[in-house]
Amino acid sequence: MNKTIYLDNAATTRICDEALEEMRIFLGDEFASPLGQYDPGFRANHALETARKRVAQLIGADPMEITFTSSGTESDNLFIRGSVYSRLREMKNHEAKDEEIVIVTSATEHAAVLKTCEDLADFFDKIRLIKVPVLSDGFLDEKAYAAALHEHPFLVSIMHVNNETGIVNDIKKYCEEAHRAGALFHTDAVQSVPHMRLNVKDIGADGLSASGHKLHGPKGSGFLYIKRGTPVCPIITGGGQEREMRSGTPGVGAAAGLGRACEVLAERGYEDDTAAEAAKLFESKIRELMPFARINRPGGAAAKEVSGKIKYIREIVSVSIPGGESLSLLPDLDMAGVCCSAGAACSAGKEGVSHVLKAMGMDDEISKGTLRFSFSRYNTCEEAAEAADLVSGVIIKNLRNHGKNI
């Protein structure tokens, strides 16, 4: 059997050894509820709060601004729905029956944001959703964004790093502009927290979502930063755990693993470019071996930084194959020993065209031939080079078998 080269880290990452060991403690002997008023319960609660401090330290927040969730998706839902519900309650109490709630987001958001916003607009007549288009390079159409802000939005949600293309939005700028328009600002930072140093105080966001399994923590863990004083209603009600923000007995094991993964990431820093170097080598070889392929990057082979601002993270490499069918390529790549995804992993196995690539104006036929390769610190340059050889071999053979001239 071929050695497996795992290049789907934007979908999920291998849990780091440190996080796994931390989890085992609280999934084994230290199993007590952190709500228990006895010594084992106090130890569990101490572990929970230690994890909260570790998460907060990674992003420059106050621990009391961190709420543990089950995923980035839940974190997005909690802030978007929770802030809107808070506003609806306020309007009801003040009998502001005719007031409109405008939500602004981008056309290339993760489904956790996009579908949540669409759902709210479908359920409530007084909620209007504005989806800001993007340019052909995937970046926000800033003129359209400015026009949307003139609609006096209540909430703006713009992702930091796109999960399909790796482009990096200037969320500090967009946050400042949203605040000037009187709106709350939320960002889905699921793909940026693992790869970029960020500080929520510097960004200025009112809410920031992240996921544990994207940063070498456990699946079933996530967190939401809520800036102190931001009105957000819980969407899971009950016993009032997590300071009334998320009811239910806290999963100490998942939180402990997430906290330890964040601590390891903070200790390692972002100067170790192992993943970026492996991705860079892979991309370079793909360009060489398959000159007909399209790399979905801003400006194609553009520099990573323009005017001192990061345009994209290298760790996500989106490759479109004209004449290819990504869903038919995946089994062949799997047999060759390479794990990747067709566009976004969250829609893997589903027919259709990526809404991100469609928003960028890509032709549907090319979009259907798009594969996403994503790297982590556990990938090496040696296996990146091997993967590029395997991938190009599989794709060229597949295209020729289907009568394509390569």
Image (spheres, rainbow, N blue to C red):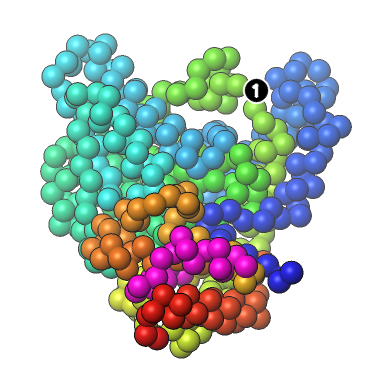
Coordinates of residue 223 in the picture (x, y in percent): 54, 40
Image quarter of residue 116: top left
Q: How many marks?
A: 1
Front-lying residue, 223 or 177: 223
Tell me what residue is drawn at x 47 percent, y 43 percent.
Answer: 209
Tell me what residue is drawn at x 62 percent, y 67 percent.
Answer: 335
Disc 1 residue type?
A: Thr
Coordinates of residue 305 in the picture (x, y in percent): 38, 74
Q: Is residue 60 visible?
A: no
Front-lying residue, 388 or 244: 388
Coordinates of residue 352 in the picture (x, y in percent): 35, 53
Membership of 146 in magenta stretch:
no
* Dot 1: element: loop
Give above or below for 103 relative to 90: below
- Residue range highlighted in magenta: 316-335
Image side of residue 233 versus residue 219, left or right: left
Image quarter of residue 28: top right
Image side of residue 219 versus residue 401, left or right: right
Give above or below for 106 relative to 3: above
Membership of 333 in magenta stretch:
yes
Give above or below for 339 relative to 116: below
Tell me what residue is drawn at x 66 percent, y 81 percent.
Answer: 382
- Quickly name the residue at label 1: 249
